[in-house]
Image: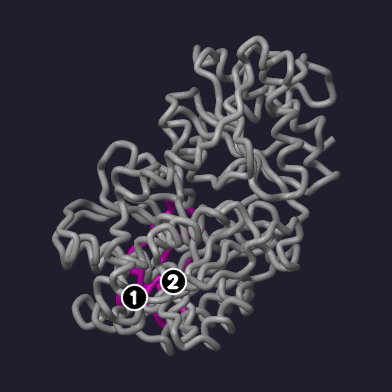
């Protein structure tokens, strides 16, 4: 039987292979044992799930195992976005949350995400303890369970609706009156996921004209991974191009913790640029002050904005849990990742694609200009940067040679002299000309992820070719 392994955002697996009811029961018991060891079991857990196949069934089974362990479940009565679950556990002051989601992964995946009491994704020391406990129990019946009817009678199961409280928080964070007053029409795409009836509904309640697509539940996500990247939202882009009244397109992934932004002319805007634009907007237009954080793989454009406004920039390993720590401690105004994760001070220490989309809508309404125009204006003030990621497949020989190659790089790569090496997550080479590249090996595939950034699009293309040749030759 396969081992339980927690990644950057929980344990994920393929249906009927490693993601089975037996393994789910084991992981749930491991979480229950972890909470007992921490003295937190009496605080209960929020239990939720996204719109994937059998999500509610897995969640109900988890509630039964938790009840058998004497731990109360606050059970979301319908599929719920990840940031909403984080918001609810903080509001109720529970010991944490168990969320069934595989986020943007394809339809045949599901996962368990455990969030501790502070509301962000669990840190490695927490997931490591749960992982160890689970793997020691695999293949054994190590739990007892109760029917949900019995659990409810004992006060160990309660159905909840976390939606109203979360939407009330958004109404405090976003100027919906400004968005509505602008008169702009917005396209919305929840990608068949749990973001439906959140992003679209709150805009409709504010009397904002919207056009929406992919709002019905579909466990196959329309045949594409539920990821709001350019390659997977072509139908959305075509909708925006066809309707001249649409000013902005807003999309979220399957559990609504990631965002995808499309300009009014159908141009997809890279998440890296959105992070920098929002930091600039929040300081320059909203009059807020505070530092920023980004992952090591994220564009230095946000560094340039931070320097322009005289605030500090923190660099973290990949994984929003590290940024979430800064948000939880109130140390930053905004934090984000190149993989379209973002949150802000005063909100959940978890990625929130719904919030990110609404902040962009507010920014466009306030500025009265397209996102491409705003990006050019930002470039004129802080300098131009272009960034992109590619995947490089490895043969067994190249994969075996990779660690030594990355640990002992030459003084220059492709004629670019290395100025500094950062190894907080992968190997990041900063070059003297201001460009950089980062190599991160996939934990599950024979693939190296190459991130690069340069001053021009042409130089970026050259940089990526240089990086690819460095790995393959």
Q: Residue at x 76, y 36 (%)?
A: 57
Res. 374 visible in picture? yes
Start-end of magenta stretch: 407-436
Q: Secondary structure at mark 2?
A: loop
Q: Who is closer to the viewer here, 347 or 149? A: 149
Which one is earlier in the sequence, the residue at label 1 or at label 2?
1
Q: Residues within 10 Å of mark 2 (few under 14, many from 20)?
A: some
Dot 1 and dot 2 residues touching (CB under 8 Å)? yes
Q: Which quadrant is the C terminus positioned in?
A: bottom right
The location of residue 346, given as percent across then percent down, is: 30, 43
The location of residue 135, given as percent across then percent down, is: 73, 28
Q: Compared to 33, does 85 lie above or below?
A: below
Q: Residue at x 43, y 61 (%)?
A: 203
Find disc 1 in the rendering and name its residue: 183
Image-quadrant location for residue 253: bottom right
Is residue 421 a member of the stretch shown in magenta? yes
Image-quadrant location for residue 368: bottom left
Find disc 2 in the rendering and name its residue: 209
Q: Residue at x 17, y 65 (%)?
A: 284
Horizontal relation, residue 471 to residue 135: left or right = left
Q: Secondary structure at mark 1?
A: loop
Horizontal relation, residue 30 to residue 327: left or right = right
């Amino acid at each position: 039987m396969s081992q339980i392994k927690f990644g950057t955002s929980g344990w994920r697996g393929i249906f009927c292979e490693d993601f089975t009811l037996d393994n789910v029961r084991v992981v749930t018991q491991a979480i229950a044992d972890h909470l007992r060891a921490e003295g937190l079991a009496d605080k209960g857990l929020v239990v939720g799930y996204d719109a994937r196949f059998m999500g509610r069934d897995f969640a109900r089974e988890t509630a039964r195992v938790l009840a058998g362990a004497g731990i109360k479940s606050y059970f979301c009565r319908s599929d719920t976005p990840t940031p909403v679950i984080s918001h609810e556990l903080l509001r109720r002051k529970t010991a944490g949350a168990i969320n069934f989601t595989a986020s943007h992964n394809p339809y045949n995946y599901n996962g368990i995400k455990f969030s501790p009491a502070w509301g962000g994704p669990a840190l490695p020391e927490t997931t490591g303890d749960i992982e160890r406990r689970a793997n020691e129990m695999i293949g054994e019946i190590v739990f007892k369970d109760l029917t949900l009817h019995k659990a409810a009678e004992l006060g160990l199961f309660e159905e909840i609706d976390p939606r109203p409280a979360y939407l009330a928080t958004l109404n405090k964070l976003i100027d919906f009156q400004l968005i509505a007053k602008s008169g702009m029409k917005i396209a919305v795409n929840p990608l068949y996921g749990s973001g439906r009836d959140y992003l679209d509904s709150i805009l409709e309640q504010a009397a904002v004209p919207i056009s929406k697509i992919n709002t019905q539940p579909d466990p196959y996500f329309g045949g594409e991974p539920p990821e709001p990247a350019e390659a997977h939202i072509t139908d959305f882009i075509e909708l925006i191009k066809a309707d001249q009244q649409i000013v902005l397109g807003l999309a979220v992934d399957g559990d609504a913790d990631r965002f995808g932004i499309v300009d009014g002319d159908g141009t997809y805007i890279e998440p890296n640029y959105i992070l920098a634009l929002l930091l600039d907007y929040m300081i320059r237009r909203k009059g807020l002050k505070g530092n920023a954080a980004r992952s090591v793989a994220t564009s230095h454009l946000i560094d340039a904005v931070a320097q322009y406004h005289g605030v500090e920039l923190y660099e973290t390993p990949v994984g929003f849990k590290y940024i979430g720590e800064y948000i939880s401690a109130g140390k930053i105004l905004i934090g984000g990742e190149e993989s379209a994760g973002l949150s802000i001070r005063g909100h959940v220490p978890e990625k929130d694609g719904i919030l990110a989309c609404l902040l962009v809508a507010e920014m466009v309404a306030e500025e009265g200009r397209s996102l491409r125009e705003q990006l050019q204006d930002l470039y004129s003030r802080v300098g131009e940067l272009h960034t992109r990621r590619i995947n490089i497949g490895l043969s067994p020989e190249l994969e075996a040679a990779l660690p030594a190659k990355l640990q002992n790089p030459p003084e220059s790569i492709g004629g670019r002299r290395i100025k500094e090496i950062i190894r907080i997550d992968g190997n990041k080479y900063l070059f003297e000309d201001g460009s950089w590249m980062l190599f991160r090996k996939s934990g599950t595939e024979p693939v190296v992820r190459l991130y690069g950034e340069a001053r021009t699009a042409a130089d970026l293309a050259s940089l990526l070719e240089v990086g690819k040749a460095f790995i393959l030759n």
